[in-house]
Amino acid sequence: MFPVGCACNPGNIRRPRSPSPLGLASPGTGGLPHDSGMEKLVVCPYKRPNALYRLICFPWAGGGTSQLAQWGRLFSSSIEVSSVRLPGRESRLKEPFAKDMATIADEFSSVLLEELQEKPFAFFGHSFGSYISFAVALHLKEKYGLEPFHLFLSGAHAPHSEEFVPIKTASVSDAKDEDILKYIEILGGTPSELLQNEDVKKHLILTFREDLRVLQTLSFEKAERNIPFSCDITCFNGTEDKSHDVEAWHDLTSGDISFYELPGGHFYLLEPSNEIFLTKHITKCIENAGL
C-alpha cells in the first residue's frame, strides 16, 4: 500500500521529557511573540530574546510539537528554537486539516515573516517535516526574497527526485485503518501504550492519513538552470532506515551540502545519543556560519 520507508511518517504522540509545563522557561519579552495567535501556530517554550539566530523545526507526519520544541533546552543561548504546529492537532485540534502544501507554506510564511526578517534563521525538518520546511523556504524565497541560511533535512528524498514519485502515488483514500496502523507500528516512534488508547489511535491514524494526503499535493519540478536556494543544506538519515535520494538536493542549492548517517531506523533522532549529536552539530553549523 505505502512505499516502504515512506518519508511521511507518523510519530509524535510522544510524552515530552518535561512532564509539567512548569518545567518550561517562563515567558518573557522578545523572541517569538507571546500572543495567542503566534503561539497557536509556533511553539517556543524556551524563549531567548537575545538570541542571535532562530531555528524553526518542522515535525513528521502525525506529529505534534512536544519533541522538537523541547530541543530549545539543548541549544546555546545564541539560538532560539521553536516548532511549528499544524492544524488538526494539539491546540489546533478543532481546526480542519490543511488542504494542501501550498496552504501550509503560505500560512507559516505569513505568520513567521516579520520575525524571520529580524534575525538570521535556519530550518530543521524530519521526514514529512523536511518537505514542509522546503515548501515554506521556497515560498519565502519566491514571494519575499527571503531564505534560511541553512536547511537541515532528515529522512527525506529531494522533492524532484524519482524516488519521491511512489510517495505521491501511494493509495491514501482507499487505505484501511488497520493497514495504516500496521505501518505506523513498523516505523516506530510512537509509544506502544499510546496505541492501546482507542481515541489516541483513531486520531493518529486520521492525522497520518491527512498528512500523507497533503504531502501528495507537493508539486515541484526543477526548471533547467534554475537553482532555487543559495543556502547550505545538511541531510541526515538513519543507518537502518530506507536510503533516501539525498544526492539530488545538490540540484537545489548553490551552497555547500553535507550528509550524515546516524545509527538507527527512521526515528533515529529520538535516541538520546543521536539527539545530542544533532543538536551539537546543528549548533556548530549555525554559530560557524559567520553571519
Image: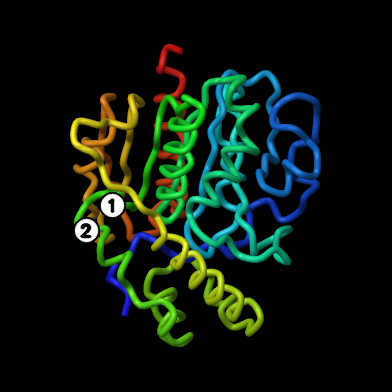
Q: Which residue is mark 1?
A: 157
Q: Residue at x 63, y 76 (%)?
A: 200
How far is the residue under mark 1 from the one under mark 2?
A: 7 Å
Helix, strand or loop at label 1? It is loop
N-terminal of the pair, mark 1 or mark 2, is: 1
Display colour scheme:
rainbow
Q: Quadrant of residue 138?
A: top left
Give the total of numbered labels.
2
Helix, strand or loop at label 2? It is helix
Q: Residue at x 52, y 46 (%)?
A: 105
Q: Horizontal and vertical percent for residue 254?
A: 26, 25
> How many residues crowd mark 1 within 10 Å: few (<14), some (14–19), many (20+)?
many
Q: Residue 226, relative to residue 261: is it above or below?
A: above
Q: Quadrant of residue 87?
A: bottom right
**Mark 1–mark 2 CB contact (< 8 Å):** yes
Q: Residue at x 60, y 46 (%)?
A: 107
Q: On the rendered structure, is 124 left or right of 74? A: left
Q: On the rendered structure, is 286 left or right of 228? A: right
Q: Residue at x 46, y 54 (%)?
A: 270
Q: Horizontal and vertical percent for residue 244?
A: 24, 54
Q: Residue 58, relative to residue 169: is it above or below?
A: above
> How many residues crowd mark 2 within 10 Å: few (<14), some (14–19), many (20+)?
some
Q: Determine the residue located farthest toward the top in the rendered image.
A: 290
Type of the residue with mark 1: His
Q: Residue 117, relative to residue 4: is it above or below?
A: above
Q: Horizontal and vertical percent for residue 155?
A: 34, 52
Type of the residue with mark 2: Glu
Q: Which residue is mark 2?
A: 163
Q: Horizontal and vertical percent for residue 163?
A: 22, 58
Location of the N terminus (image quadrant): bottom left
Q: Nearer the viewer, residue 191 or 80?
A: 80
Q: On the rendered structure, is 145 left or right of 221? A: right
